[in-house]
Amino acid sequence: MNESNQEVVDILKKTNAVVTNSHFVYVSGKHAPEYVNKDYVYPHTAQISRIAEIIAEKYKDLPVDVIVGPSIGGIILSQWTAHHLSLLKGKEILSVFTEKQPNKDQIFMRYYGQYVKGRNVLVVEDVVTTGGSVKKVINSVLKEGGKVLAACAIVNKDPKNINPDFIGVPFDYLAIIGMDVWDEKDCPLCKEGVPINLQLGYGNQFLEQHKDYPR
């Protein structure tokens, strides 16, 4: 298991992207006492640039041609990572993204698939909770004829289960935050009746489906 990059953790805390001691519902439906609000780090261009630079440095020796990330946050991350990798390699590294569909698939739109065909790809993501989005991006790259060399996330919330064997390609991350993640039925916070956080995450959607949960 990798250790967290302290510089990355410090950046996330400095930008107030890490919120603790509450009861959050993730997009995956899982519950946790911590939340990484990645949207808080993206407005700080110097900070997200530095995080992307760390990713680029990690993969500078791989023959990467294209960086791919899932929308929305992955767009910014893929752009900055491609920028820094281009500087390190002295050649242009492309950046494209996939878009989430109503069925939750991640596919290439805007003819972006043509930029991965026959090329070596690095997939980047900000936060992984289940790893589902990363796997869907990888599948889309493969369908378009690209080769995925590796995948990397800023934060891995479940390093025990989200690993290279699960993702299907070499996979790494920069930080571990929020390892206490539960299915709804196993959530100790639910059993204690701890109020759901409605400011961050998907608490409102959860309460719509659970009218009897304590407000």
Image (cartoon, rainbow, N blue to C red):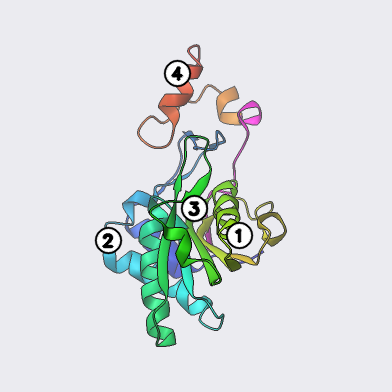
Residue with the mark numbered 2 = 44
Mark 4 or mark 3: whose residue is earlier in sequence: 3
Residues 169 and 187: in front is: 169
Mark 1 or mark 2: whose residue is earlier in sequence: 2
Badge count: 4
Real-space Cα separation, disc 3 to disc 1, in angstroms: 22 Å
Q: Type of residue at label 4?
A: Glu
Q: Type of residue at label 1?
A: Leu
Is residue 10 in view from this perspective? no
Q: Type of residue at label 3?
A: Val
Assess whether residue 184 is covered by the magenta stretch. Answer: yes
For the magenta stretch, what is the residue range? 173-187
Q: Residues within 10 Å of mark 3 (few under 14, many from 20)?
A: many
Locate the C terminus by quadrant. Answer: top left
Pointers 1 and 2 in contact (CB under 8 A)? Answer: no
Residue with the mark numbered 1 = 142
Residue with the mark numbered 3 = 127
How far across and down, in percent of the image, does residue 89 sit?
44, 86
Q: Secondary structure at mark 3?
A: strand
Q: Secondary structure at mark 4?
A: helix
> Does 84 sit left or right of 139 as displayed?
left
Q: Type of residue at label 2?
A: His
Tell me the mark number nearer the camera, choosing from 1 and 4.
1
Residues 124 and 91: in front is: 91
Assess whether residue 142 is covered by the magenta stretch. Answer: no
Asked if residue 52 is positioned above or below residue 188 in the image, the reply reads below
